[in-house]
Amino acid sequence: MNMMSEAAVEKALDQKMNAVPFKMIGKDVSVYYGEKRALFDVNLNVRENTVTALIGPSGCGKSTFLRTLNRMNDTIDNCRVTGKITLDEEDIYDPAIDVVELRARVGMVFQKPNPFPKSIYENVSYGPKIHGLARSKADFDQIVEQSLQKAGLWNEVKDRLHEPGTGLSGGQQQRLCIARAVAVSPEVILMDEPCSALDPIATAKVEELIHELRTNFTIVIVTHSMQQAARVSQRTAMFHLGNLVEENDTDKMFTNPDDQRTQDYIMGRFG
Amino acid sequence: MTEIVSSSSPAFVRPTAARRDIGIKRRYAAERRFRAYGMVAIMTGLFFLFVLLWTVISNGYTAFQQTTITLPIEFAEKVIDPKNERAANPSKLMTANYPLLVRDALVKALGIDPKNRAEVKKATEMVSASARMQLRDIVIANPSVIGTTVNVSLLAEGNIDSANKGQIDLAVEESKRKVNDQQIGWMKTLTDSGAMTKDFNTGIFTFGASSRPEAAGIGVAALGSLYMMLIVLVLALPIGVAASIYLEEFAPKNRLTDLIEVNINNLAAVPSIVYGLLGLSIFINFAGMPRSAALVGGLVLTLMTLPTIIIATRAALKAVPPSIRSAALGLGASKMQTIFHHVLPLAMPGVLTGTIIGLAHALGETAPLLLIGMVAFVVDFPGSPMEPSTALPVQIYMWANEAERAFVERTSGAIIILLIFLVVMNLGAILLRRRFERRW
């Protein structure tokens, strides 16, 4: 009886998940750094308004895959990407695609909080300014306030918007970076281990924030913490040695994974 | 607990206390020796710096004083304009016999018999020959002065100035001295009557070149140096920064850019006289620019300063953390926006420091200027960088070749002024760096 209901719940979840359309589709994605191949024909799709966690041991290619999604790998000199990645059925590696526009649609939050050494206000308003999203001071004020509110930082900084962003605490800086990414109104937000430089309380705040952001944005997050993946994501993808091992619903992944390697990694047998 | 202790490996033998002690002592001794070497090195450096400064300052501080003789000059009409032609022919005032005015005033002040020509000659030698120009300028500026008597402060001649500062040894036999006993006596008379005084020497800052030390100054040379510094700043800063940004941020990393990088680093070490030769053959012989002009000097110094600025700027750009670039690129900024909005402002203190140090280097540079004809005897202030001028360090070089005692002190005085400029520029660089240094 118990078994039955569990299976039924799982099935229901699966169906619910399967009904969510794909936002980004990665097909046979391979990445080379010079001669070295870092990713081997990864097929991984990202569902809309879902948090997808990428896990795996260090050097497994999860950050590399994340960075292919907004072409941040372009900034690395000898990096080459093959395969096809689409965003809303548009090939993002198409020469006709403007990287600047792509990155406005696919934002990014980095491992170490990296606010610009400018004021909090300037940090948040920089993206809208270069993309021409606002004209008047009032528009900018509104975007800054909304973004900071979405990042859960408004109440903490509303009285010191013109103080430097670098003066905030680590957790606040990371939320400022999230606000900065949100201000451009992207469709997808990529997060590369956003909590690895934060203490547990700041981490909890950021995780809560990710949970809230999910309603408006599609989120892909790379994390080293299995607990974090389990807490924040709906889908989880496990990478190992440049291969995608398994991609599944997070609940299933952490209770009953299909692949033995996933099982071993989650149990802490390697990695 | 006891079980655990007893179960530890019996094979483990502690090294004896004595052996460990020796090792630690040696380590501390080595560290103390190393510190001592460092202290000795720094003390040696400080000692030589002190000797240098002491020599320059002790020789040079007197250059900022100048002996003047204040005499009641009677601008007698019968001397200046005996035929009363000045209304018809103003140039008469230019060629009037002004030395006679000085002579008459001196003879009166010292009570010498005007008929004793040898004494009168010795007396007039005490006043600088530049007094003639001084009086002429007074008369031309204000012709109504003719016929009146005015107290005028005239520069004392260089040797009298030296004697007044106690730099001429009076124990030496009179015939071997530049100043004879009679003149010493007159100096005493003039000093006692308050006519001869030692004042602050403004002339050293304002005069141009002169073969008479009392009328020589660094004014023209300083203006030439200023022109050159402006040219260097206007050309080297934008070219250097643009080159660095391209090389650091845009250029592909390949053999060609490696070669360029190596060459830039080498150029920074090329002897400056080579730049002088290059400037001579390209700017003067090929492009036909005027000799001795600050323009050519500025161009040569620009070439010389460029590698310094490029190296400093590249280092400053490299020091901007990559996370700032990622942040801007991740937001969808273009490469140029990333560089001009974020990277360059953060690198600016380093760029400015490099530029100021490069400028200071250029300000003190002499060798290349010798080759492009800036070792020139320039009396008049250059109205533009195209006109002949000279430079501060070149002026020092020229004065150092002069024999008079008064030029020795002026050489050191000019070195002091140059050193003050350099110290101020370097201080400015440090302050800029402090002021704009940012944490991230």
Image (spheres, coloured by chain):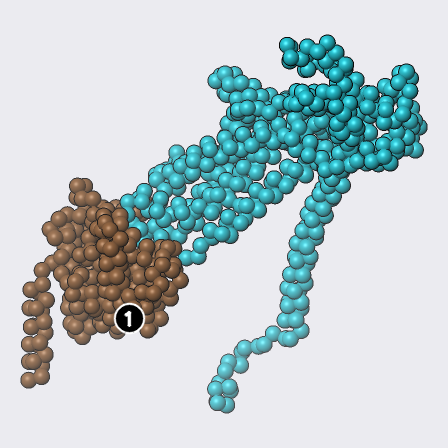
Chain colours: A brown, B cyan
Q: Quadrant of the C terminus of chain B?
A: bottom left
Q: Residue furthest bottom?
A: B2
Please provide percent x and percent y for residue A268.
Answer: 28, 72
Q: What is the secondary structure assignment of the residue under circle 1?
A: helix
- Residue in front for this viewpoint, A12 or A244: A12
**Vertical position of residue A33 compared to residue B369: above or below:** below
x and y, in percent, of residue B248 in the image: 39, 41
Residue type of the residue flagged with mark 1: Lys
Left or right, B349 with respect to B402, comes to left
Which residue sits at x=68%, y=55%? B39
Q: Residue at x 46, y 43 (%)?
A: B351
- Name the residue located 23 percent from the left edge and 57 percent from the top edge: A143
Q: Residue at x 26, y 69 (%)?
A: A207
Q: Relative to A19, is A216 on the left or the right?
A: right
Nearest the eye: B20 or B385: B385
Q: Position of residue B147 (x, y in %)?
A: 74, 20
| As drawn, B62 above or below A32 | above
Q: Relative to the observer, which residue lies in front, B228 or B26?
A: B228
- The quarter of the displayed image where residue A211 is located: bottom left
Q: Looking at the picture, tell me which residue is in the foreground, B181 or A99.
A: B181
Q: Quadrant of residue B363?
A: top right
Residue A149 at x, y percent in the picture: 25, 65
- The answer to whether residue A132 is visible is yes
Q: Is residue A153 left or right of residue B184?
A: left
- The residue that disc 1 covers is A205
Q: Is residue A81 visible?
A: no
